[in-house]
Amino acid sequence: MTSEQTEAETRLEPKMPSVRKTPIATKIAYGFGAAAYGIKENGFSYFLLIFYSQVIGLDARLVGLAAMIALVVDAISDPIVGYVSDNFRSKWGRRHPFMYAAALPVSISYYFLWNPPANLTGQNLFLYLLILAIIIRTFITLYETPSSALGAELTDDYDERSSLISFRFFFAWVGGNFMSVLNFFVLFPVFATAIITNGQFNRDAYQVYGLISAILIFAAIMISSLGTHSRIPHLRPAPPKQQISLPRIFKEIFQTLSEPSFMALFCSALFGAVATGLTASLAFYFTTYFWGFSSQQTGFVVLGVFISAILGSILAPIITRKMGKKRGALLIGALAFIGSPLPIVLRLVGIMPPNDDPATFWIYFFANLVDTSLIICYQILVSSMIADLVEQTEVRTNRRSEGVLFSAATFIRKSVQGIGLMAASGVLYLAQIEAGSAPEDVSSASVFRLGLFYAPIVLSIWLAMMSCIAFYKLDRNSHEKNLQALKER
């Protein structure tokens, strides 16, 4: 072999990251971009069903169906976006061109989601929702998958990855929660009228919400993209050029995702996302119809999520160092997801105080604060576990596939609005809460059925999630062995 050949192969071979610690400025910039996804996810999870069903009057089952169809489109587009970003060659690296390209389309389409023409009803309104849901999901994938994949490139350290991803989940939760606080403390009170006494049911409030959200989504994407732009020379280069065909793309995607630990994690996270989506979609139904909280009380519950984001983001790196990611996820997951429906179960069996007792609010407030902290911690651990699979699959396939692996993570999170929203619409149907019903129009029997059907369904999904994650095999020692094997190779 000539020296020229050796030099050429060295240039083509992707390099291992030279620094395992990530600068704090990079962590903040990387994490801040997740606010865009957090705002979009918060809107889809918490407000989409109640806006299109109770405010506009579209059948809740059609709202769920639209989200479900868009999820099927995601199942095809997400891994393709991940694969293309893994192999893309440009002067701006593999990831950033997609991140910049997504900023404007996702912002504009998100604005129009909350501003449907007033004359649309029935099937036409359903088609409007469906088309925009697909557009938003596609462009958020174009940003979120390459952006998330940066986490596995910025560091390969087992503990540092949990720290880095904590910043991402912190900003995602804070960004999304900021919009909920803005709604309940500003927009909904401002848009309360003599006719619509609860501004939560005034469509004009959501028009302003859509505009503010669109501006913040655009800002978060651009600030994060620009803030991590300087790291491009330190990231892995694209692999050598090769002839690409659709069969080859799906063959390599399948090879990457067939890793047994990935399949265990994927199934577990998918069940977790469905349960989270079910819980999120019905959250304001429960605070409004089941617990009878005012908009201000619901706003204080939402404010508590800021504390939860801080606690969950601090807890995840500690759990990683002390217990490892898998053991930590099993413990935290069990505590979080058993506690989630506990106040509802206590109400069903007659232990919780009545709704007019002030103690009811504070019991719910602190239970939700602790439970949300644990859920955020769990999500960080799972995402960090996905990042560790990058080296595991590289050892087996000789390919770096951050984009493909994190496209699966993106798909899982979007299942929150797909399968979870579909399940939530089914619960509303079983409870016989009709579209457009104000709280005073819903019978006590329907409210009771809401809790009665919700609790066992969500607990069953959590149990399935915990069963799957037990089959994940990658730990700290095996991760270090993978790094050593790649170094020697």
Image (spheres, rainbow, N blue to C red):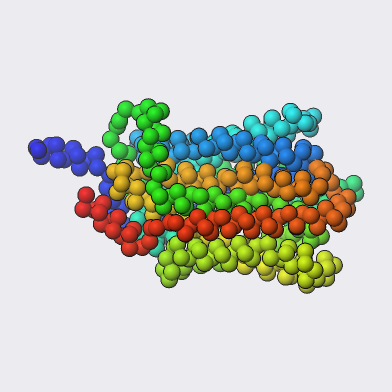
> Where is residue 96, by image quadrant?
top left
> Where is residue 122, by image quadrant?
top right
Residue at position x 73%, y 54% in the image: 453
Q: Residue 413 at what x, y percent from top left? A: 55, 48
> Where is residue 417, by image quadrant?
top right
Residue at position x 41%, y 44% in the image: 257
Residue at position x 52%, y 43% in the image: 411
Answer left or right for 305 relative to 481. right
Q: Residue 281 at what x, y percent from top left? A: 68, 50
Foreground residue among 451 and 211: 451
Residue at position x 54%, y 37% in the image: 74
Q: How many marks?
A: 0
Residue at the farthest left position: 2
Q: Is residue 299 visible?
A: yes
Answer left or right for 144 relative to 321. right
Answer left or right for 25 relative to 367. left
- Quarter of the image for the N terminus: give it: top left
Q: Residue 94 at what x, y percent from top left? A: 38, 39
Answer left or right for 212 relative to 314. right
Foreground residue among 377 and 252: 252
Q: Residue 262 at what x, y percent from top left? A: 43, 50
Foreground residue among 47 and 354: 354
Q: Is residue 229 visible?
A: no
Foreground residue among 103 and 409: 409
